[in-house]
Every structure is written in C-alpha cells, then in structure tokens.
Image: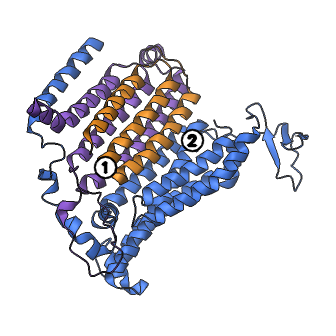
C-alpha cells in the first residue's frame, strides 16, 4: 500500500498531462464548431507547458530567484542544489507568448469565415462551399 | 509541493477542461476556458514556477478570455454540438 | 467520424501511458533536467549579470536571440490580424448626432457640416451607440491609472521579482483594453490611435534589434551587452544588467501595442466603429 501510494504520487502528474492532451486532441478532431476547435488547441498547448514545468520541479527546494542577490556581500557561494531548475520556465515563457499570438490569428480567421459564410459549423460551411 | 492540494487542483483542471468543450453555449465555453487558465496558473505557482504562473495569469485569465468573448460577440453564440 | 476519433485518441493515450514508468519521478532532485545545464546558470547568473532573477537573466541575456524572435512572432501576429480583418470605409458625409453626457444636450450636424470647436466632451452616437453607464465609467477611471502604474513597476522590477517585460506589457495592454470596454471604443481611439499602436509595436522590435546591432558595432558579438560598458560608463557586469533592462522595455512596448491592436481588430471585426 505504501509503495502504491508512493508510485501514484510520483507519476500522477504525467497521467493528468496525458489526459489533458487527449481531451484537447479530441476537441480538435471531433467537434464541429470552429471556436471549440480553437479551445481544444489551447488546451493542448497549456497541457504541454504543464509537462515541461513539472519536469523541472524539485521537492522542498526554493524558487529560482536568489534572495539578497543585489547586496555586494562578497558573493557567497550559491548552491545549485537549493533551487528549482529555471531552464524549463524560460522555454515555457516563449511558449505562452506564441500561444497567445496563435490564438489571436485563429480568432481573426474564425471571424472572417463567419463573415463570408454566415456560420461557424464545419459541415454547413462545407455545404455552402460546394453550392458556390 | 504539497501533493493533496496539487491533486485537488488537477481534478478541477480536468473538470473545467471537459466542461469547456462540452457546453453548448459558446460564451459559457469562453468563461470556463478562463477558469481553466486560472487553475493552470495555480498549479504552476504550487510547483515553484512563479514567472510562468504570472505570465499565464495575465495572458490566459486576462487577455485571452477577452479575445474569446469579443470573437463570440462578433459571431454567433449558439452551437449545435 | 466521432467513434473513429475516439478510438484513435484512446490508442494514442494508451501508448503514452505505456511510456510513463520511464519518466523521472515528480520532484526528484536527481532528474536529468536538473543535472546538466541548469547548475551553470544558477551558480553564475548573479556574478555574470548582477540580476537575482535567474529566469529573466537567462531569457534576456543568455538566450536573448530566442526572445528577439519571440518578439518578432508577436509583432507578426498583430500584423496578420490587421491584414485579415481590417476593412476601410469611406467616411460618408451623412447626418451625424452628438450628445453631451452630463446634461443630455444633443446636437445634429447635417451633411457636410463640421463640429464646432471646444466640443470635446460631446460623444458620437449612432445606431451602434453604447449606453452611458456612470458606475462603470467612474470605477474604471479610478482603476486604470493604478493598473498602468503596476505594469510599469512589473517591467522595471523584473530583475528582482517575478515579472519582466512580457508580463508588464500584457498588463499595460489590459489596462487600455479595460478603458476601451468601459468607455466606448471611439474614446480609446482618441487616446491611442491605430497608427500609434502599430508604430509602437514596430518601435519595440526595433529597440531590441537595435541594441543587438549597437553591441555589434562596438566590437562584440550580436546581443553581447558587456560591450555597452563604454557608452553607459559602468563596468561590464552592470552593463549586462542595464542591457537586459533595455531589451525588456522593448519587449514590453511591442507586446502592449500588439495586445491593443488585436483587441481593436477583434472586437469591432475590422470596422473600427464600435466594440464590445
């Protein structure tokens, strides 16, 4: 029982990440509405960011900002073991920026499709394209 | 890194995510998506990624929800599925 | 179609689940992500750049090239949204109505007439007119300056606390969007016109690239901020800290302008007459 709980605590992060990727991909493939597909795309993006951040986490260590760093008290030695690894955070900041840029362009495309065809459901759009 | 708090917030994240794609009303889906973003921000703050949590709070639960509501306002609000 | 999608998704999820026993445990200090490259950044960030926030130091100094292209991506998203949605209309000369909010006086300007001088308090109304709500207007007038001040604080204090250029830029853009939502879109256009927003976003990217080119002309590599020590009259370590601040200001300016421009185009569907 103890080892089962320890195993669960060590890995449930990854299971939640896989579940979120499955939800997002299902929304992108199977939903007919364009805005639902865009929501699915954003769910996949934030799930991947969760995965990267949880790789760099360490139990019991502190955040990657060095306290009293701006005082010139002789540069006492900084132990790398005391801090959470900051590299995944840097990569994920860029990923969040790219996700909001993609969201803006995707919503602009959805508004343009609505202006042209009058609907956002993909089967009706396909019918109206065929009628043209 | 208290794992029961983390587990509860993750369950909430899954519920918000499933709710955001199942709701028939697009405005409700946009608001649920804002709640999903905010729960993700809490998760990352628990894991120690303060910069990422700050960015997601300002971008996801702020500006991104406004963009969704603006797009839903300019197109239709009802959806068939 | 849906059952096929469900089966495919379950298959993919099953394969991913099958791979999870090989992942490092959550919270393990000896996981491979924390052992190889990050100890160098944690130990040497303060003595190389005098910036205690390691994430800002890595983002703007050690990996500054990536951040420059991320700023270019945000700028191109703003331009793409402009290309997709913007429709230009000729300003047709028809009867226009203006209304003074506090007293309720309404003016009607006939075809081809001009608005008399000194009437800046008159708001334009037409069929898309947004109703005047005093509570929202007064409350947002109290809140917006503090939000902008907080955004400037976040940009400037990014060296010592979580924050930096991108977060401060988004918060500043959110303050202007709040002003545009509570008052109507036309009053936001009077404060920050579309042309000014696009120029500001281009200026932000130009500031970032210009700093890199200046370091190139002074004899170092591209984006090597220690060569700015001659211009700023500080030693090389503080020059890197100031170089990080300059590029963060550039990133914040570009992001603020693009958020505002995206809101202008999305909420009015390109027509720029009335928004949410």
| Label 2: how many Cα within 10 Å (few below 14, some 14–19, many 20+) | many
Q: Nearer the viewer, mark 1 or mark 2?
A: 1
Chain ID for blue: C
Chain ID for orange: B
Q: Quadrant of residue B17?
A: top left
Give the labeled residue for mark 2: C265
Residue at horizontal 23%, vertical 59%? A83
Give the labeled residue for mark 1: A92
Lateral position of residue C24 relative to residue A57, left or right = left
Which chain does the numbered disc 1 sit on?
A: A
| Residue C217 visible in the shown view | no
Query: Coloured how?
Result: by chain
C266 or A16: nearer the eye?
Answer: A16
Image vertical order of residue B9 relative to residue C39, above or below: above
Indicate the quadrant containing the C terminus of chain C: top left, top right, bottom left or bottom right: top right
Tell me, yes or no, whether dots 1 and 2 are on the same chain: no
Residue C12: give x, y in percent of width and height: 18, 25
């Amino acid at each position: 029982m103890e080892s089962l709980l320890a195993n669960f605590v060590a890995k449930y992060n990854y299971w939640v990440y896989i579940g979120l990727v499955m939800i997002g991909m299902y929304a992108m493939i199977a939903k007919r509405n364009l805005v639902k597909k865009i929501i699915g795309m954003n769910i996949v993006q934030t799930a991947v960011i969760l995965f990267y951040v949880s790789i760099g986490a360490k139990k019991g260590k502190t955040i990657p900002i060095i306290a009293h760093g701006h005082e010139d008290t002789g540069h006492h030695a900084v132990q790398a073991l005391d801090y959470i690894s900051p590299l995944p955070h840097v990569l994920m900041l860029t990923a969040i920026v790219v996700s909001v840029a993609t969201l803006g362009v995707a919503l602009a495309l959805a508004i343009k499709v609505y202006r042209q065809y009058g609907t956002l459901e993909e089967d009706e759009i396909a019918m109206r394209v065929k009628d043209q | 890194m208290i794992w029961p708090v983390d587990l509860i917030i993750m369950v909430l994240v899954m519920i918000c995510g499933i709710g955001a794609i199942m709701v028939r009303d697009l405005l409700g889906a946009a608001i649920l998506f804002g709640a999903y973003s905010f729960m993700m921000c809490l998760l990352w703050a628990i894991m120690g990624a303060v910069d990422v949590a700050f960015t997601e709070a300002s971008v996801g639960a702020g500006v991104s929800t406004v963009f969704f509501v603006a797009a839903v306002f300019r197109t239709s609000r009802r959806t068939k599925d | 179609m849906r059952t096929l999608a469900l089966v495919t998704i379950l298959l993919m999820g099953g394969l991913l689940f099958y791979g999870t026993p090989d992942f490092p445990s959550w919270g393990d200090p000896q996981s491979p992500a924390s052992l190889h490259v990050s100890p160098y950044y944690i130990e040497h960030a303060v003595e190389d750049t005098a910036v205690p926030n390691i994430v800002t130091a890595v983002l703007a100094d050690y990996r500054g090239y990536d951040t420059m292209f991320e700023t270019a991506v945000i700028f191109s998203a703003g331009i793409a949204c402009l290309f997709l949605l913007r429709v230009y209309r000729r300003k047709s000369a028809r009867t226009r109505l203006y209304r003074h909010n506090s007293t309720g006086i309404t003016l009607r300007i006939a075809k081809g007439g001009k608005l008399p001088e000194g009437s800046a308090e008159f708001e334009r109304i037409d069929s898309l007119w947004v109703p005047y709500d005093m509570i929202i207007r007064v409350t947002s007038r109290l809140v917006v300056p503090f939000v902008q001040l907080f955004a400037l604080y976040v940009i400037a204090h990014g060296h010592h606390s979580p924050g930096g250029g991108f977060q401060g830029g988004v918060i500043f853009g959110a303050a202007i969007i709040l002003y545009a939502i509570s008052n109507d879109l036309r009053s936001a256009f009077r404060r920050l016109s579309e042309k000014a927003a696009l120029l500001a976003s281009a200026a932000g990217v130009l500031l970032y690239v210009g700093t890199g080119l200046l370091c190139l002309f002074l004899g170092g590599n591209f984006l090597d901020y220690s060569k700015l020590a001659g211009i700023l009259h500080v030693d090389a370590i503080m020059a890197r800290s100031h170089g990080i601040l300059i590029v963060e200001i550039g990133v914040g300016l570009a992001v603020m302008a693009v958020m505002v421009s995206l809101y202008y185009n999305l909420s009015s569907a390109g027509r720029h007459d009335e928004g949410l």
